[in-house]
Image: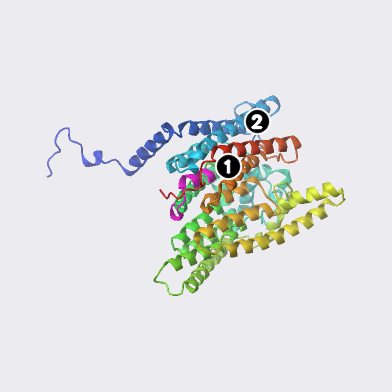
């Protein structure tokens, strides 16, 4: 029999905390260091802003038909009249605080003086307060759940709108979209079907579950962005600051629950896997991304140039071009297989290819062809705006196709230029597509620092972020058709851009080559 331990001695299991305990202590220490260091005031401002945004959203957000939590606790007056004005005020104060915190971190991020830890904590601390929030700045999340309920009920979301499946979930969908089929892929439907199943038939519960999924995906995006930055020699803190901690991501991903986050994570994962030479897995990731949203296919061709660059750098490879083509063919085959399997699993067939066109129903100024149609119609004072719009959008499609091919071909030199090509291709898509929403620009932001833009471009990006956030109201209504609100958004954007240019004029590059 082993002797008893010496009285007062600490046994091995007591002196060696469990893995969860050590992880919790490490996280606590990391958070304390971030909050008590130079980033602390900015982090606290952003946290307060996010909390106020969540609180204001209970009165001015994309509320459920029963009024949401405010009504449930007896505060019906918070959702209309003077109460709603108070709620809106809280929302915009929250947004201002978020921007204040974000902009305060920016110059340090782009000069290489912001620890990656602090940028990651900014993303987490500014996103987590939205966990109990209602959907904000869009009612799309309610439509997502209704589409999941349709799939579970055997109603084809690619042929019918939510009104074809009456019930608690369809009741929450905006009247504008009740008769509209979904343009999203089969994996989106499978995910939403799962959320609906776990929710027990309660839309409010479904929103909480969906937000947990979105916040988890945002965490994955942050990790992947750090990995991509370190593999490509750019500052990871700058990349995370511009993409994940941005008010655009906090408001429209964590708050608005847009499904852009899922294919974006898969696409960035495909890039990281390709950088590591794991092309088969990269192909699977692209297949997953496209199965969420067809936009993801834009990233796929650029993986060829990353693979080719890697093969050229390997002295053991005799025919790098041939090997890269073979790798890409294998990745494409795997991606197609994944897409096919998810399509079969959804049980809805390939109807989503035709349903993509339903997005053309949306008309706003964020799309260049749509803005051009409005301008032409106003200047010429000609009848038939729909005809002008149709022509402008068709021209936009042609220009976009040419631009995508040109960007792809001109950015073939190495992995660095390929990453810039991805960013430019996504930017071209967002600008020239028939439809654009503020959250579409999160795709561009995710690849922005990886593309190593210049100071003028980054100044424009910061100013544009301000405009994009102000373009949509907390309840999801667009501000772009109000001359006053549009003017305020433009002036705020220009003011912030001017401040940013003056503040960062001494910084040589917005993404210093610091891989730490």
Specify which label sits upstream in the sequence, 2 or 1: 2
Q: Nearer the viewer, mark 2 or mark 1?
A: 2
Q: Nearer the viewer, residue 118 or 161?
A: 118
Which dot marks residue 140?
Answer: none
Q: Is residue 308 toward the left or the right of residue 502 in the image?
A: left
In the rendered structure, which segment of residues is drawn in magenta?
A: 230-243
What kind of colouring is applied to the model shown? rainbow
Nearest the viewer among 435 and 414 is 414
Q: Residue at x 70, y 60 (%)?
A: 399
Residue 1 lies left or right of residue 35; in this view the side is left
Q: Which residue is mark 1?
A: 207
Percent position of residue 295, x then y:
61, 57
Q: CA distance from mark 2 to mark 1?
A: 21 Å
Q: Measuring from the top left, give residue 155's x and y in whole percent.
A: 66, 55
Q: Position of residue 450 (x, y in %)?
A: 51, 52
Is residue 201 visible in the rendered structure shown here?
no
Classify mark 2: residues with Cα within 10 Å, few (<14), some (14-19) or many (20+).
many
Q: Secondary structure at mark 2?
A: helix
Q: Which residue is mark 2?
A: 88
Residue 68 vs 461, above or below: the answer is above
**Residue under the point 51% across and 39% down:** 107
- In what element is the residue under mark 1? helix
Magenta segment's dominant SS is: helix
The picture quadrant where one finds residue 71 is top right
Looking at the rendering, which quadrant does residue 74 occupy? top right
Say left or right for 303 vs 178: left
Q: Residues within 10 Å of mark 1 (few under 14, many from 20)?
A: many
């Amino acid at each position: 029999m082993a002797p008893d331990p010496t009285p007062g001695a600490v046994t091995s299991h007591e002196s060696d905390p469990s893995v969860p305990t050590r992880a919790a202590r490490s996280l606590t220490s990391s958070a304390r260091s971030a909050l008590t260091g130079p980033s602390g005031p900015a982090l606290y401002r952003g946290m307060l802003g996010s909390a106020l945004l969540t609180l204001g959203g209970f009165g001015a957000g994309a509320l459920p038909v029963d009024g949401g939590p405010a009504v449930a606790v007896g505060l019906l007056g918070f959702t209309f009249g003077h109460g709603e004005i108070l709620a809106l005020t809280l929302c915009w104060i929250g947004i201002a605080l978020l921007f204040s915190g974000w902009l305060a971190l920016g110059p340090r991020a782009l000069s290489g003086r912001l620890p990656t830890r602090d940028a990651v904590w900014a993303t987490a601390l500014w996103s987590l307060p939205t966990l109990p929030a209602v959907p904000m700045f869009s009612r799309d999340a309610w439509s997502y759940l209704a589409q999941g309920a349709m799939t579970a009920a055997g109603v084809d979301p690619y042929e019918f709108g939510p009104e074809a499946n009456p019930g608690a979930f369809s009741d929450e969908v905006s009247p504008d979209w009740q008769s509209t089929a979904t343009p999203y892929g089969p994996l989106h439907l499978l995910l939403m079907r799962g959320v609906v199943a776990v929710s027990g038939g309660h839309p409010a519960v479904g929103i909480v579950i969906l937000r947990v999924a979105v916040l988890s995906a945002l965490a994955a995006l942050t990790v992947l962005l750090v990995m991509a930055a370190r593999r490509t020699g750019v500052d990871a803190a700058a990349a995370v600051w511009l993409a994940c901690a941005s008010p655009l991501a906090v408001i429209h991903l964590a708050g608005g629950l847009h499904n852009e986050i899922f294919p974006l994570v898969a696409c960035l994962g495909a890039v990281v896997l390709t950088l590591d030479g794991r092309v088969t897995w990269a192909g699977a990731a692209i297949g997953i991304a496209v199965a969420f949203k067809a936009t993801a296919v834009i990233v796929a061709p650029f993986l060829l140039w990353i693979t080719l660059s890697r093969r050229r750098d390997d002295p053991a490879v005799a025919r790098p071009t041939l090997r890269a083509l073979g790798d890409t063919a294998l990745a494409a085959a795997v991606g197609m297989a994944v897409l096919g399997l998810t399509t079969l699993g959804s049980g809805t067939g390939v109807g989503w290819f035709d349903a993509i066109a339903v997005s053309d129903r949306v008309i706003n100024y964020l799309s260049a062809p749509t803005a051009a149609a409005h301008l032409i119609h106003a200047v010429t004072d000609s009848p038939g705006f729909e005809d002008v719009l149709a022509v402008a959008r068709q021209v936009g499609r042609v220009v976009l196709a040419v631009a995508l091919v040109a960007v792809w071909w001109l950015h073939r030199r190495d992995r660095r230029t390929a990453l810039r090509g991805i960013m430019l291709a996504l930017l071209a898509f967002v600008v020239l597509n028939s439809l654009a929403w503020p959250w579409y620009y999160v795709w561009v932001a995710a690849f922005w620092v990886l593309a190593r833009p210049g100071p003028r471009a980054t100044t424009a990006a910061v100013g544009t972020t301000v405009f994009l956030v102000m373009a949509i109201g907390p309840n999801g209504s667009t501000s772009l058709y109000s001359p006053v609100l549009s003017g305020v958004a433009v002036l705020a954007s220009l003011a912030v851009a001017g401040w940013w240019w003056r503040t960062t004029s001494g910084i040589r590059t917005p993404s210093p080559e610091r891989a730490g």
